[in-house]
Image (cartoon, rainbow, N blue to C red):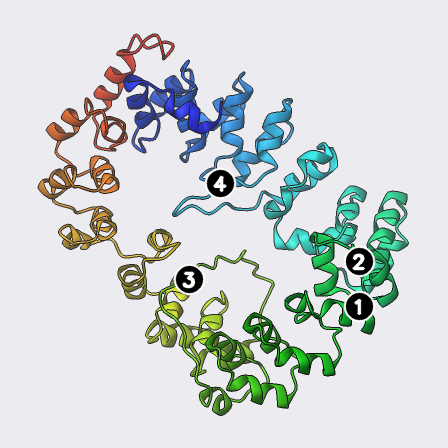
Amino acid sequence: MTPEQISESAGPAERRLIGLALNPAAPVDVLLRLLASESAAVRMALCRDRVLPDPVVDAVVAHPDGTTRGFFAENPYADPEQRARLVDDPEYRVRGRLAREPRADDVCMPRPLPDRTVVRIIETYEDDLLWELNRLISPGLRRAMATHPSAKVRHMGANGWRSLTPRELAALLADPDPEVQKAAAANSRSYARLRDPDAVREDLPAHPCHAHTHLLMYGALAPDVVAEALPRHARLIARNASVPPETVALLAAHPDPKVRTHVAQRPDLGPAERRALAVDPDPEVRLALSVHPALTEEERAAIDYEVEQDKSYCHYPVYDPELVPDLELVRAHALSAHPLLRRRAARELHLPADLVALLAQDSDLGVRVLLGQNHPDAPAALLLRSFLEYTGRGRWHLTGHGNFPRAGLARFAGAEGPAVRRLALLDPGMPGDVADRLTRDPDPQVRADAARHPRLPQDRIAALLDDPELGRRAAANPALPVATMYELIAAVPEVVAGADC
């Protein structure tokens, strides 16, 4: 059964136990009883959808059921060190779940596994379990793969998981392990053929496919290949760095605005083409050209471009403390009059404090939202303002920032938008009567959050336990008395073992 099917199969009593499994105030004994449940839906919620105390993690890792251990292997809330305890699990399906990135939600973003665990996976897992491992590798280990002591790790590094320096490639080609040498040689041949116009011509498929697209975009193209591709595949070759200047000039005047937009982003664009595209009749072309690195601020300002404000701003980089950007360029972008360049600066984790303060007051919504999403020192006022003004993808993720303000949010309980009313329920000081009222809100997510609020009156929590919609949420309320938790378990002895409490 899929996780969705498992959840849908739960009856009313099981749904209350699911809520109880998610209750942050549930004591260890309650959680251990739920772990012994016959209900897969209860065990899934407990092991996959929350942070667990260490004694419960110990019991999960030792649980005899592989499905249960597999739920924990894909828990995005668990510390990666805890999940790493399953690295040598005897069951294929558990190892498979550990080796792929856990799903994310509105607030929780998956974190890389410990380096030693990733190395263990590479060294011992079946090849078909490694294809999703990429996002679980830390930036530091990724850089070290080509020179790692483990031959299997070097083999993966030689397979093109990242661009290799000439020095790294040379070392891999002389590696003492023949399999590493073989992978490095294949990587080297592939790169060499991509840079050889005759080899690209030979390898280019006659029909459109992934390889056809890749070669036209990134391969070294001979003049006859360019001439043949120009009528039907101008959008692809417009990005190709090997296209000669005379062809770039033709593409800059192409009737398809998408082609001209791609050309406008070429770093090798000449002055004549830049001048022509700066007054292009298509606004997308002018916008693309307006951020060209060769332009001065005065030249950018002379272009009639418009930056839209009704799009999603969603950018979550993998934090790499060793990767320091060109801070001089970042500062130039932050001080630019162009919103798109200031948005680039706002994404930088290493943005200096004075620029954080400056961009927090920026007139562009995208700049403010991206700063809130990406910078660890984003101020509280910026985070709240961004949430209230932004309605795109990743909006609720802002509330998971450590600086997001919570006290006083109850003032939004009467807001028109349901997302803002939901924001009010993050206030730990929410008045009980307001939380009670919001359990009757027309929006289902607001009702669900209200049912879990710890300031909800006890009589309302008790009433909601029997509610078909909100019973599970009420059981997850941290204000639920411990005695009631045991009563919920005892009510379904056929589901929970040892329920005679």
Seen at 80% across and 62% down, the residue is 194
Q: Is residue 4 left or right of residue 295?
A: left
Residue underneath mark 1: 225
Three-letter amino acid code of the residue under disc 2: Leu
Marks 3 & 4, CB-CB < 8 Å contact = no
Q: Please determine whether, in this image, residue 334 is positioned above or below residue 321.
A: below
Three-letter amino acid code of the residue under disc 4: Arg
Circle 1: is it few (<14), some (14-19), or many (20+) Cα within 10 Å? Answer: some
Residue 98, located in which quarter of the rendered image?
Answer: top right
Q: What is the x, y in percent for residue 440? A: 14, 37
Q: Secondary structure at mark 3?
A: loop
Three-letter amino acid code of the residue under disc 3: Tyr
Tell which of 36 and 181 is nearer to you: 181
Tell which of 171 and 104 is nearer to you: 104
Three-letter amino acid code of the residue under disc 1: Val
Circle 3: is it few (<14), some (14-19), or many (20+) Cα within 10 Å? Answer: many
Question: Mark 1 or mark 3: which comes first in sequence?
Answer: 1
Q: Secondary structure at mark 4?
A: loop
Seen at 12% across and 34% down, the residue is 457
Residue underneath mark 2: 204
Residue underneath mark 4: 103
Circle 2: is it few (<14), some (14-19), or many (20+) Cα within 10 Å? Answer: some
Q: CA distance from mark 2 to mark 3?
A: 37 Å
